[in-house]
Amino acid sequence: MSDADTRSRPVAVIAFGGNALLRPTDHGTQEEQFTLAWKATRWLYEIIHRGYELAIVHGNGPQVGNIMIQVEEAITKIPPQSLDVAVAQTQGSMGFMLANQLRNRFNEEQLEKEIAAVFTEVVVDREDPAFDNPTKPVGPYFTAYRANLLMQEEGWQMVEDPSRGWRKVVASPMPARILGNEYLRKMISDGVVVIAGGGGGVPVYQDVGGYYRGIEAVIDKDYVASILARDLEADLFIVLTNVPMVAENFGRPQQRWLRRLPVRRAREMLEANQFPPGSMGPKVRSAIQFVEVTGKDVLITDAEHLKSALERAAGTFIVADGDVETATLAQ
C-alpha cells in the first residue's frame, strides 16, 4: 500500500523561481526578501486552504548569483566557496524566510500546521554530457584580464557577453534522484508543509568508492520538483511562471493561449522548439515527465491567476489525454 492510499488529504507540489523573493528591480536587501516571502505566503496558503498538503520547491538564481559576487569581492580576505556550497547556503537562507513568513501567515489565519525547510541533496550522473558542455552562466561579470586569470589558475570555463564582460559557466545536468525522499514522504503524510529541493537541490555524485561528493553544477528546479512530485505521489503538480498560461507561437501574431494541453501535443510542441530551453522549455518538459509517469495533471500559471486556476478557471493544465483547449486571456 502506498502513502497515497492511506493519507486523508491530497498532495500538491509547487515550484517557483528565485525571482519570487528577489526581483531584478530590487536592491536585494533582507527586508525586501522577507516582504516578498510574506506576499508569496498568500498563494501558498491558498493551496493549503483548498485542502492540499503542500511541498514547496523554490529557485535561487538571483540569490546564488549574489553569493558568488560576495565571494569574488572578498577573495583577498576569505577563502572562496564552491557553487554547490553556495546552493546549500541559499537553501538555508531562503528556506528560513519562507518558513518564517509562512508560519506568520498560519498564525494570522489561526491554522495550526508545522513547517520544515529541508536541506536537500540531489544525485546527478558524473558522466552526464552536460559536464562536457557547460552552458549555465552563474555569478558576477569579470574583466577580460580577471577572466583570463581565473581560466588559467582555477580552470574555470567562461563566456563573454560583449556588453557586460566575462562570466563563469557551469554544467546543468539532469537530476537522477533526491536523497532522503523517504523522510520527505513521512513529513507530508504527517501533515507537515515541506520546503525542499531549493535551487534544484545541492548537486552531488557518487564516486567509485560509493561516497557522495558535491560538484559545481546548477540543476533546474522544475526537473527536481517533478521528481519530488512523483516521489510524493502528488495529486497536483503546480509550476509557477511569469505568464498566466502556456501559449502556442508565443509572441507571434498567431499566438494562442492554451487552457488544456494533452501530453502528446505538449511533446510535439516541445520537439518543434515552441518552448525555449531557458524559460518555458524545462517547465513543459518537467510537466510531461510527471504526467507520463502518474497520469495526473500539471498546472502552469502565474501567481496572480493561481487562485482561479485552482478552480480550473485559469492557467494551463497539461493532462494525460484528450484534446487541446484554447482560451482567451481577459485584459
Image (tube, grey):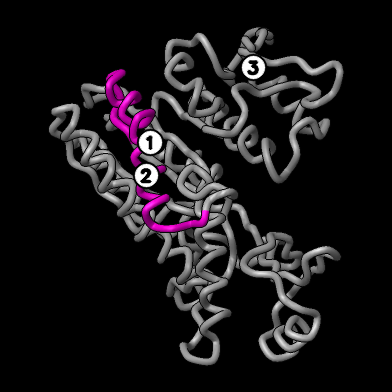
Check the image and report above or below for 248 versus 136.
above
- Please report the residue visible at 75 percent of the width from the left and 39 percent of the height from the top: 276
Location of the N terminus by quadrant is: top left
For the point 57% across and 70% down, the residue is 216
Residue 147 visible in the shown view: yes
Q: Which residues are magenta?
A: 27-54
Residue drawn at 40 percent across, 40 percent down: 231
Above or below, 253 against 113 in this view is above
* Rendered-image quadrant of the C terminus: top right
Q: Are marks 2 and 1 in contact (CB under 8 Å)?
A: yes
Q: Amino acid at mark 2?
A: Thr
| Quarter where residue 46 is shown | top left
Q: Where residue 262 is drawn, which disc sits there?
A: 3
- Residue 115 position by quadrant: top left
- Can residue 34 be found in the magenta stretch? yes
User: What is the C-alpha distance between the residues marked 2 and 3?
Assistant: 37 Å
Three-letter amino acid code at the position of disc 1: Lys
Can you identify the residue that label 1 sits on? Answer: 39
Residue 324 is situated, as x and y percent measured from the top left of the image, at 68, 10
- SS category of the residue bearing label 3: strand
Rendering coords of residue 94 (x, y %) = 38, 54
